[in-house]
Image (cartoon, rainbow, N blue to C red):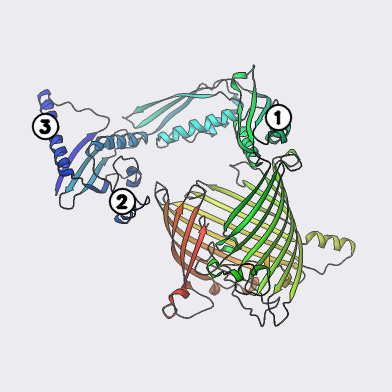
Amino acid sequence: MQRHRSDSQYGQTISPPGDLVKFGRIFLFIVFLLKFNVFAQDDIRFELESIKFEGNSSIPGKVLGSILKSKESPNKIFQFINSFTSLGAPPEYLDLTLLPVDVDNLALFYNTNGFFKVRIESYYSLDSVEQTADLTFTVDEGPQAIFGRIKLHGLESYPRSDYWQINERLVIREGQRYTQEGVLQSINGVLNYLKSQGYMLSKYDSTIVVKDTLIDRAYVDVYFNLGGKYFIDSVSVLLGGEGKNEVDPTMIREITGIKDGEIFDVNRITQAQVRLYRTGLFSYVRLFPAIEEIKDSLVPVKIDGNITQMNDLNPELVMNNIQNAFNFGVGLEYNRKNFLGGARRFTSRAQIYYQDVLALNFERLFSLITLTDTVTTGATEFKARIEEPYFLGQPIFGSLELSTLITKVRYLQVSNYKGKVNFEFELPKFTFINSMNLFYAIEYNRQTFISARAGNPWVDLMSAGLGGLFLSSHVDDVIFPSVGANYSFYIEEGNFFPYLFSKLFTGEYLSLLFLKSQATASYYFPLNDVNDLVFAMKYSGGYIATLNGNKNDVPYIKEFFVGGSNSVRGWGSRAFPPQQSTEVNINETNIPGGRVMLEGSFELRKRMGDFLGTAVFLDWGNTWRELKHVKISEVAVAAGFGFRFYTQIAAFRLDFGFKIYDPYDRTPIPERRFFDLMQFHFGIGEAF
């Protein structure tokens, strides 16, 4: 084993005697040549087995490692996979020419985080037998500086009464620990605010940071060019593409919501472009200020885009997590754009999908719409929808939908016929509630009990109600959230308006009146500074209150179920409440479905590179028919592990769940068969 050491210092200069300097340089040059020859002989390379850091008490080694040009060699499994595929990763080798660069990069990184007196040294050891190398960086961090005075220049002409808004955009304060990232975030925050207040041409000029290493303070002066305040002069539209003659430019201007004479707001420009894309009319669209045509304080805004064909027919593969299970199927979708003008879109879609694809055969392919099969689980759906992207000239996305959905679960077939009016409201991104959907739906349900012996009896149920879904999403990444929280609250009433009408005009109402609510909260906590190790938790609860009529008349499609790929993963989809009905005894009083639901999850997630990840989890939950029936002893518990494959659009998930506590089967776990305890799930997206 050979051990080699090299020293480097950041921010100081050492000046030994001249002859010693010359001798030292010659000596180091000879040593470097010798090392180079050793490495080059017979093309010997030393695989970089480990990179370690010593003395880095303030910044984790994982963060420092991401800065280095030198990289640790991946484990043998990844190397083996890479030897015959494009996946995995090849081995990494020690490169002495990278060490000075790595030391300088580390020192610069520490410097940008306020460690102005940092010293860094590196050394490595070689194993000539195994042909491996270990690389170590020793860090003497020194004290971390704090912010002293922070001053913005060039904004003197900004109205004093609103200057507090600029200060609110600063994420740095005097006395806080110095970080260059905080300075950059503050600069971007101020610039974005100025550009949203009409100062379209405001610019960042420069930053001067005076570092006082005697008292470890950093004094920051940031210089801006404010420029003038601008207003919208006009909005002009230039259209191209195959469908340009079928679209009215005036309609395009109205969709943006931008009015002549209003203050120029870069956020409104971005929002308007998103609205245009949502119409589905454009293959390409750009909305921008025509700076070269500015007159006085007025700036024209131009829209440049290509209009696609108005009609398209698309076959599709269906993959979703409906009913907390992976469903696979096929579909066909037709789109008519600019339907009846106003950028409305008409969409019709037919889909058929199944849960247990491997159990399918040709005879069962269309069994979802028959009453002869009690094995196949899945659904077939037809939907027709008209979308209004800018309802009543307001930033409201409206839609009218008619649909037929036939769902089959063992001995039960549910046919749902629905008409629904939905309104999706644009809300500011940084408010607590940043997505809101309100709807009114009229539904007719026929629940058929598949029993040839009993003549396939059915029950017809009707409901009409107003509802809403309120979302609060404040996470750093939709695909792999590592910081923040998500909240959702769903509420729906059933038959309130028929109840009110009957009470006003007939004095009595004998049918069902119910109120359904469900709340879910998910939290994400990073366990390291690079946010690739995350602890996540979810809590969810729901309740259906029957205010009038027979509780058993609550439609099956409205009730709660637990179990599946996004629920308690030790069981299959809709495992709770447990199935109690058979072909002999099935009726409207014992079909599955709960009116009270509690569930939650704890999950530790690790992302390994850009594409792969793993997770371990603990899930719990159950549903009950009545609130008084809720028992802690009936809460099912499952644990397991899983693998993730990340893409730019979603994560694909493979989970193995194991029953830890089954409230309805007290057989000791060692006495149960392995495959009775394990449940396999494939899902799209993280479990929560």
Give the residue number, with chain letter if any, for mark 3.
Answer: 27
- Where disc 3 sits, the SS reads helix
Q: CA distance from mark 3 to mark 2?
A: 35 Å
Q: Residues within 10 Å of mark 1 (few under 14, many from 20)?
A: some
Residue beneath the point at 9% across and 24% down: 19
Between label 1 and label 2, give the one nearer the viewer.
Answer: 2
Circle nearer the viewer, 3 or 2: 2
How far across and how far down the image is residue 539, in percent?
Answer: 55, 60
Closer to the chain start, of discs 3 and 2, is 3
Q: Mark 3 belongs to which amino acid?
A: Phe
Most extreme residue toward the right is 505
Place of residue 203 in the rendered image (x, y in percent of width and height, measured from the top left): 51, 24
Tell me, yes or no, if residue 530 can be seen here: yes
Instruction: Report whether residue 173 is seen.
Output: no
Determine the residue located farthest toward the top in the rendered image.
Answer: 296
Residue identifier under label 2: 74
Task: Give SS at disc 2.
Answer: loop
Using the numbered discs, state the Cα–Cα distance from disc 1 to disc 2 in whole angstroms: 57 Å
Disc 3 crowd, CA 10 A, few/some/many (<14, 14-19, 20+): few
Q: Which residue is mark 1?
A: 259
